[in-house]
Amino acid sequence: MADRLRRAARITVLTGAGVSAASGVPTFRGRDGLWRQHRPEDLATPEAFARDPALVWAWYGWRRERLRACVPNAAHTVLAAWAGRWAGMTIVTQNVDGLHERAGAPDVLRLHGSLWHVRCADACRTGKAPRPFDDVLAPEVLPRCPSCGALARPDVVWFGEPLDARVLDRAANAAARSDVFLAVGTSAVVFPAAGLIPLARQGGAFVVEVNPDGTAFSDEVDVAIRGGAETVLPRIEQAMAAAGPCRP
Ligand code: BJW
Ligand code: ZN
């Protein structure tokens, strides 16, 4: 694995909630994924927000509070170091927690948005998405758009909503052109993100999964490394360092 990476010109890493598990961020489909008896699938939808925006904001407020106490773990640190070292490395994340960026990773492709940004739930009736505005100061008061007064919503992608086409295009291009593609800490059940794995494979990439458990794509990867990202990635880094200088 370390040797494959050292020889690769283009590396793409797709990350999911498991990469932040060791930082104390709950995964979506793990045992601690429930919040007040609600499944993420029932809250992360435009319908849930339309029905009960206070409930959905309470969930995001709770997640933000938890996240404030979390720091990047060794997996984020190694990925940020690789991204700084290799111009041909792309980090594509499904995570909205911002921990890759806090570890220093440049130019992260965020497929599902950011927990730290909010935007107008009404797109200011112009059809144009306004720039994300500031953090919510008082979570018990529903945040409103400063431009038009409509409710504000988290700047994330909910089920049934399209991903940012430019971000998805860049991620798909990177996946299709990769020499090595790593899927780290994702159950690979949510599309179109999970579709990057077969896309990379079809493009000829050597595909590696890093996860303590099997996933929807385990049978289709070249190597499945069973373990936590926070231990597996530093081990790969050590093996690469032991093998000498990398391809520039
Ligand atoms: C560790 C670990 C450790 C633990 N180390 N690992 C094709 C087929 C079927 C369905 C669809 C399809 N195309 C589209 C769909 C519908 C839908 C979908 O995929 N549904 C499936 C669930 C069936 N997709 C969508 O709706 C998407 N939109 C779309 O397709 O739009 C089309 C459209 C076009 C034009 C107009 C309109 C529409 C949008 C999907 C948005 C997903 N959003 C969420 C919420 C984001 C905001 C928020 O955070 O609140 O994104 S859902 C949630 O799941 C979140 C995650 O990013 C995403 C993926 O989860 P992830 O990261 O994989 O987490 P887990 O918990 O599932 O897995 C954690 C893993 O970590 C596990 O495997 C553990 O074992 C592992 N682990 N400890 C390493 N230490
Ligand atoms: Zn507005």
Image (cartoon, helix red, strand yellow):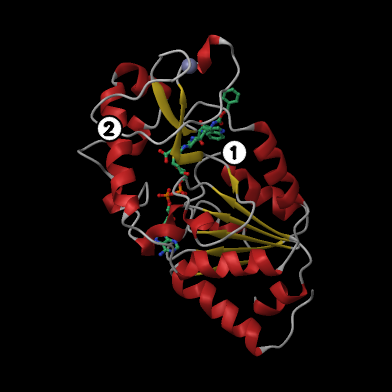
Q: Which residue is mark 2?
A: 138
SS for dot 2: loop
Task: Report x, y in % for residue 178.
Answer: 75, 58
> Which residue is more in the foreground, 32 or 119?
119
Q: Quadrant of residue 245?
A: bottom right
Task: Report x, y in % for residue 223.
Answer: 60, 68
**What residue appears at the point 41 percent right and 26 percent down from the top-left corner?**
153
> Which residue is more in the foreground, 177 or 132?
132
Query: How far, Cα to Cα, is label 2 from label 1?
Result: 34 Å
Instruction: Indicate which disc residue 192 carries.
Output: 1
Q: Residues within 10 Å of mark 1 (few under 14, many from 20)?
A: some
Looking at the image, tell me whether mark 2 or mark 1 is earlier in sequence order: 2
Q: Quadrant of residue 121?
A: top left
State yes or no: Cβ of the residue under disc 1 lies below 8 Å from any atom of ligand 1. Answer: yes
From the viewer's perspective, is residue 30 above or below residue 224?
above
Q: Amino acid at mark 1?
A: Pro
Quadrant of the frame with the N terminus: bottom right
Task: Report x, y in % for residue 7.
Answer: 77, 74
- In the displayed structure image, the side of residue 165 where residue 157 appears, left or right: left
